[in-house]
Amino acid sequence: MGELTTSIQFLPGVGPRRSALLTRELGVQTLGDLIRIYPFRYIDRSRIYKIADLRADMTGVQILATVLRVEMPGSKRLSVWVGDGSGELELVFFSGIKWNVERLQKGRRFLFYGKPAEFGGRLNMVHPEVDAAPEGGEEPQGSLTGVYPSTEKLKNGGVTGKVMCRLMASALALCLPEIEETLPEYVLRDNGLVPLRYALYNIHFPKDQYALQKASMRLKFDELFLLQLSLLRQKFVKSRSGTGIPLPKVGEPFNACYRALPYDLTGAQKRVVREIRGDLKSGVQMNRLLQGDVGSGKTMVAVLSCLIANGNGYQACIMAPTEVLAHQHYINISKYVAPTGVRVELLTGSTTAAARREIHAALEDGSLGILVGTHALLEEGVRFRALALAVIDEQHRFGVDQRAKLWSKGAGGLPPHVLVMTATPIPRTLAMTLYGDLDVSVIDEMPPGRKPVKSMLIGPSKRPALYSFMRREIAAGRQVFVVYPLIFESEKLDLQNLQNGFEEIVKAFPLPEYKVAIVHGQQSVEEKHFNMDAFVAGRADILVSTTVIEVGVDVPNASVMVIESAQRFGLSQLHQLRGRVGRGAEKSYCIFVADHKTSRDARQRLELMCSTEDGFVIAEEDMKMRGPGDLEGTQQSGLPISLNIASLARDGLLLQQARAYALKVLDADPALEQARNALLVAELRKGKYDIKDYSKIS
Ligand code: ADP
Ligand code: MG
């Protein structure tokens, strides 16, 4: 009894040292934790490849080959040449050299398992697994062997793939009898799922492909179904409480702004405004996520929503993540709002004490209609007379407790309506499902006149050609962004990197013919605004910066985006950056500069960027490219939940099935009170499926 909670330390082959290592690297403390670490792929040991058939894009293959010769080109590198009659292959070892020299003797035959990789125009295999060749020429009788997520430290600590398999086998033998079913009988039956015990055994040691598929489907369904059940249940509960400030009419400010618009709203903007309007008059508090690609026109939607609040005698605020962005918003919004007579002010950390007093007073007497700002809006002294709507731009940068502060500022003790805007594209099919407790609006249509951005990938040797191209664009009256990544851990070194780039640009684009502005995180706010404004107003031809321009900055006259060391950026960041151009009437360009050290994965990312501009396609690919088994994958993806085996990108169909079924279960038993759902309640109570981030919006 109690094996599931037994420490892994008591497993044969695991002492205090390895146990500490497993805890640190994989978060595993008990046998129960261990058996929930699943292989992220399987080696088909039943198949042996010919060396001549190997390709660099194969994930892992087995070859049966004889050692031809052993070389030591340096003290840190062992090179073993093997052949199988079809060709020769170099096996490379950087550690365990002595041991490998001893066992890999010339003329001996082994089974090698590893990933072919391309190096210097040839294939090789680094650190393959080595097994004895099958006896007497017989074909090996293998089945599927799991490959577990690992880290350098685990391998160095002796926890190799083989050791993991052995540990799993012992842990399963001890634990399986204790495993209890987590899903009710009727759920298993309705969905054609295998029992949990069967699934857990076969996910580690599948008898065959069929057993593996059944096991993996069962475990994925568990996660997706319980996640949906948890989200949908919150939604059921919330829609019954959630009293909000009623805003029954559209009001005159909205109409005045609408009449004065220099363009028609796109169909998508109109639809989203209608959705928001519906929420605001409903009497229930709005919690809406507004998704729209960069440049899709979210600001206009935000402004119109604020004006509805104003038209009903209330106030609204708009929070942005940075000073630069708050400033930009303020300038744009003031323009849109001018015909309405509503007063708009900007409040940031650098607002002077005198101006601040003014703003506080105007907030309290109600004469200030829309307050734009940064985190400064959350301060104690900021008291609204009647706040009804809070718009949050790029909300993921705000903490939960900060949001709570904002909610406490609502009129009459009620929380304000909340509209969260994000340009981080979440695959369309997933947004609704993932944020099951939030309402989601998507602006899926770009304003007319947006030209495709021509993208290309170049090496540093093409820089002279790039500079002449930039000169031609500038001569035609256009402006250019040049962006540098944060490369080093230290801000000082990053700044150095940016500074070097800046100097090179200034040398190539000298005064008085060219003006170059620079913006980075270490500047004072005044300096930053001075430089930004110079570029926005067209006084500077080139803006050199770090990624501070990533969100929101709108300069329609800029036609070229140059991204230096582009291999260092993630896909969604590249997408955001590229969205800064292509907003004006002229043809626009995005140039990714990547050096020769760029890895294959990074090159693939950049090639994808050159082939599409669709943010959703890019987001989806981004999720797929971060393979499972990449331990950081889920954390980096920016999703507020981490799943163990199911993938939101790949398991879309199963996700839909799980969601539909969760709805059915809740329809029949909204509070999950029936005896047959007791298991589900117990699972949900464990808290694994509570979304920690977006759900805290209300
Ligand atoms: P984002 O969604 O990235 O915040 P913005 O709100 O900044 O996008 O809008 C991008 C640009 O498109 C702005 O210059 C804005 O004035 C313009 N724009 C917004 N809506 C329309 C429309 N319906 N027709 C034409 N241009 C529009
Ligand atoms: Mg914006």
Image (cartoon, rainbow, N blue to C red):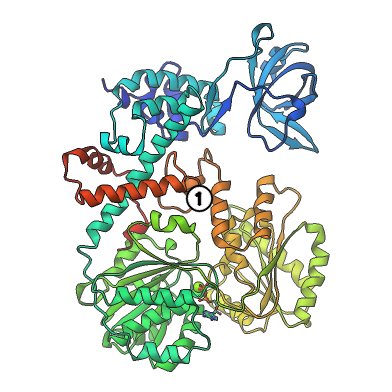
| Image vertical order of residue 184 relative to residue 67, above or below | below
In front of the other: 30 or 458: 458
Tag 1: residue type? Gln
Q: Residues within 10 Å of mark 1 (few under 14, many from 20)?
A: few
- Report the quarter where the C terminus lies: bottom left
Q: Tell me the quarter of the image containing the N terminus.
A: top left
Whether residue 356 can be seen here: yes
Foreground of the two, 653 or 55 = 653
Residue beneath label 1, please?
636
Residue 128 appearing in the image: no
Query: From the viewer's perspective, is 164 left or right of 470?
Result: left
Task: Give the structural element (helix, strand or loop) at label 1.
Answer: helix
The percent coordinates of residue 548 (x first, y second) are 56, 67
* Horizontal relation, residue 668 to residue 157: left or right: left
Residue 22 place in picture, x, y as percent: 45, 29
Q: Which residue is drawn at 40% across and 92% down?
A: 256
- Depth check, front residue: 256 or 543: 256
Q: Which residue is drawn at 45% across and 47% down?
A: 653
- Residue 178: give x, y in percent of width and height: 29, 23
User: 85 left or right of 435?
Assistant: right
In-front residue for pair 581/674? 674
- Within 8 Å of ligand 1, the CB of disc 1? no
Q: Residue 559 occupies which quadrant of the picture?
A: bottom right
Question: In terms of image quadrants, where is residue 583?
Answer: bottom right
Q: Is residue 18 above or below residue 232?
A: above
Q: Which residue is drawn at 61% across and 81% down?
A: 536
Above or below, 312 relative to 689: below
How far across and how far down the image is residue 546, in percent?
A: 61, 65
Total marks in image: 1
